[in-house]
Image (cartoon, rainbow, N blue to C red):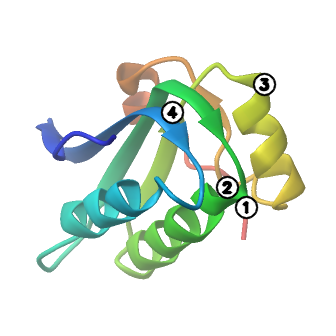
Amino acid sequence: MPRAPELFDECRMVHARGELDPTTVAPLAHALEEARTGHGRVFLIVDLREVTFADGSILEPLCAAWDDCRARQGWVRVVHSSTAIELVLLGGDVLGRFPAHASAQDAWTAAAPEAP
């Protein structure tokens, strides 16, 4: 279950943990939407380090967040070290958008990805 978004410098963070599948992804989707409320530029870090299982159901909320943040001259970055999550992102053809970052600090200081 995701925790409420929190502020990290000028960046918003969403943390998720446990299993993320079609029956459990709604709280993550809601947290991602909540983190993007308001106007102006949004920088969003999604911390998936405590996720024990994820399937393709994470793709739609992550891509919706990506589209919204990019339209507002911001970005979305994902923190994880899971081969399974990497395979889901690869299978969804969005690994270029969401390369793995080791920590929130790494995600905050990373160069913007070159993905579409």
Task: Say what secondary structure mark 1 lies in.
Answer: loop
Q: Quadrant of residue 13?
A: top left
x and y, in percent, of residue 45 in the image: 38, 43
**Residue 97: image tag:** 2
CA distance for labels 4 and 3: 20 Å
Count neighbours of disc 1 (C-alpha within 10 A) and say few if under 14, some if 14 to 19, many if 20 or more: few
> In the rendered image of this protein, does residue 78 appear above or below residue 65?
above
Characterize the local packing of mark 3: few (<14), some (14-19) or many (20 or more) Cα atoms within 10 angstroms. few
Q: Position of residue 91 (x, y in %)?
A: 88, 54
For label 4, the residue is 110
Which structural element holds mark 3? helix
Residue at the spot of label 3: 83
> Residue 85 falls in which quadrant of the image?
top right
Q: Quadrant of the C terminus?
A: bottom right
Q: Does the CB distance between marks 2 and 1 fall below 8 Å?
A: yes
Element at label 4: loop
Task: For the N terminus, give its image quadrant.
Answer: top left
**Residue nearest the observer in this picture, 111 or 33:** 33
